[in-house]
Image: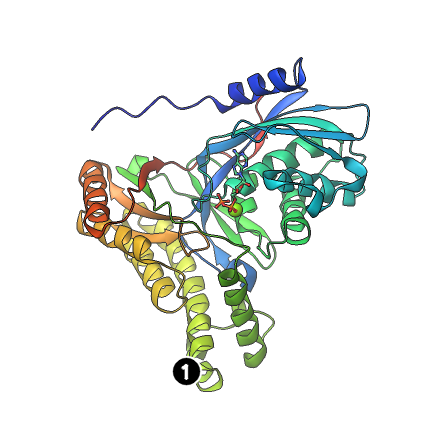
Amino acid sequence: MSAPPPPRDAAAAALRAFSEAFGGTPDGVWRAPGRVNLIGEHTDYNEGFALPFAIDLAAHVAVRARADRCVRLLSTHGGGVVELDLDSLSPDGAPGWAVYPAGVAWAVAERGADLPGFDLALDSTVPVGSGLSSSHAIECAVATALSELAAADLGPEDLVLVTQRAENAFVGAPTGILDQSASLRGTAGHAVFLDCRDQRIELIPFDADAAGLAVLVVDTKVAHSHAGGGYAERRAACELGAEVLGVAALRDVSSDDLAEARALLDPVTFRRVRHVVTEDERVLATVDVLRSEGPAAIGPLLDASHASMRDDFEISCPELDLAVEAARSAGALGARMTGGGFGGSAIALIPRAAEAAVRDAVSAAFGRAGFGAPDLFTVVPAGGARRVL
Ligand code: ADP
Ligand code: MG
C-alpha cells in the first residue's frame, strides 16, 4: 500500500485564501467537522435515537467582521467571491454553496443577534456530497464563528437549532438535527448518543483504534441529494405512519407494536415504519454493546441496520450494497451505508490487520461490477466545532 498523502492543513489554507482575497488577517479561524453516523438512520426526524461521531475531516472558516452590512464569501473550491447584503439575504440571492453561510447568517440574525457584515474564506477537507455532511461542516463552522463575532452567546445546543433553522427555512432541506449535533457536540474517541426528541446527548466511548479496529469509509461517488424527492418521500411516509398509529412520532412505537401496525398500514408504509422502529432499537442495543463489550462486538448490529435500509426503507443502491458485501467478505466485522442514502458512503468496521485486504476487495469488486472506483479512507472520532486560531 502506498503511503497516504500528508493531511491538508485546512486552517492554513483558509488563512491564505482569506488574505489573498480580502487582504490582511481574519479575526479568527473556526473549525467544524463532518460526521459519520455509526448507526441510527432516518430516525432523527422521527424523534428517535442516533449515534453519529464527528470525524477528523473538517471545514475551516477564516472570518473578519466588517463595519458595514456587506457579506463576502470565498471557498477554496472555486467560484470566486460572492457578495451579499446582510439585510436582504434570501435563498434566491445566494448562489451555490453561499446558501449555507447565508442561511446561517440569516438564522443567527433571526435570533436577535447583532450580527455585523463579514468577510469569510472557507477551506474544507470533508469530501463534498459523500454523505459525510460537508454542508453541515460549513454551517456549523460559520455558526460558531458568527455567534462569537456577534457576541450572541449561543452555545452548541442553540447552534444545533440555528443550523437546523438555516437548513429547513433557508436552504430548503427538511433535515433533522443529527449532523449538526455531531459536528457541534462531538468529542475525540466518542460517539454522540443523541435523543432527537429532547436533543439530549450522551458521549459513548468509541475508541476503535484502541480496540485494534478502524472505521473505513467507502465513498461510492454516487450522487445523493437530500433536497431530492427520496428523502421527503420517506419523511412523509413516516409522518403518515405515525398519524395512522396515533402517536406523536414513530419514536413512540416499539417492535412489540409492529404486528398491529402491519394490519393498519399499507405494505410500503409498514416497511418504512418497521425500519425506523427497529433502527431505534438497534441504536439502543449498540450503545449497550459498546458499554458492555466494546466496539468489536457491534458488527452484527451494523449489518442488520444495512439490511433494514436496503429492504425496508429502500434507500440503498447497488454500489452501497456491493461495498458492504465486499467489505464483509474480506473481514469487516460489520458494514452499513451511512447518511441519508441513495448514494454517498458506506462504513465498514474492520480489524486494522485486515485493512489492506478490505480495501483491495472493495476496489476489485467495484471494478468487476463496472462501477467507478470508490474513494477509501479511514476516519477517527474527533472533537467538535471550535475556534482554532
Ligand atoms: P454532503 O453534505 O453530504 O457532503 P450535500 O449535498 O448536503 O452533501 O452538500 C454538498 C454541498 O455543500 C455542495 O454542493 C456545496 O454547495 C457545499 N460544499 C461542501 N463543501 C464545500 C466547499 N469546500 N466549498 C464550497 N462548497 C462546499
Ligand atoms: Mg449535507
Position in image of residue 13 (x %, y %): 52, 20
Position in image of residue 86 (x %, y %): 77, 36
Q: Answer with left or right where residue 72 lies relative to residue 43.
A: right
Position in image of residue 370 (x %, y %): 23, 50
Identify whether 102 is placed above or below 234: above
| Residue visible at 48% across and 82% down in the picture | 265
> Which of the pair 333/207 is nearer the observer?
333
Q: Secondary structure at mark 1?
A: helix
Identify whether 246 is placed above or below 21: below
| Residue visible at 57% across and 31% down in the picture | 79
Residue 294 can be seen, yes or no? no
Instruction: Name the image quarter holding the C terminus.
Output: top right
> Which of the pair 125/297 is nearer the observer?
125
Task: Give the image quarter of residue 245.
Answer: bottom right
Of all residues, the one furthest to the top in this rendering is 24
| Color scheme of the displayed model | rainbow
Q: Answer with left or right where residue 200 lies relative to residue 334.
A: right
Instruction: Name the image quarter holding the N terminus.
Output: top left
Within 10 Å of disc 1 (Cα), the crowding (few <14, some 14-19, many 20+) is few
| Residue visible at 45% across and 68% down in the picture | 277
Identify whether 340 is placed above or below 279: above
| Residue visible at 65% across and 15% down in the picture | 25
Q: Residue beneath label 1, please?
A: 259
Position in image of residue 185 (x %, y %): 55, 41
Task: Give the image quarter of residue 374.
Answer: top left
Residue 276 can be seen, yes or no? yes
> Which of the pair 375/155 is nearer the observer?
375
Q: Amino acid at mark 1?
A: Ala
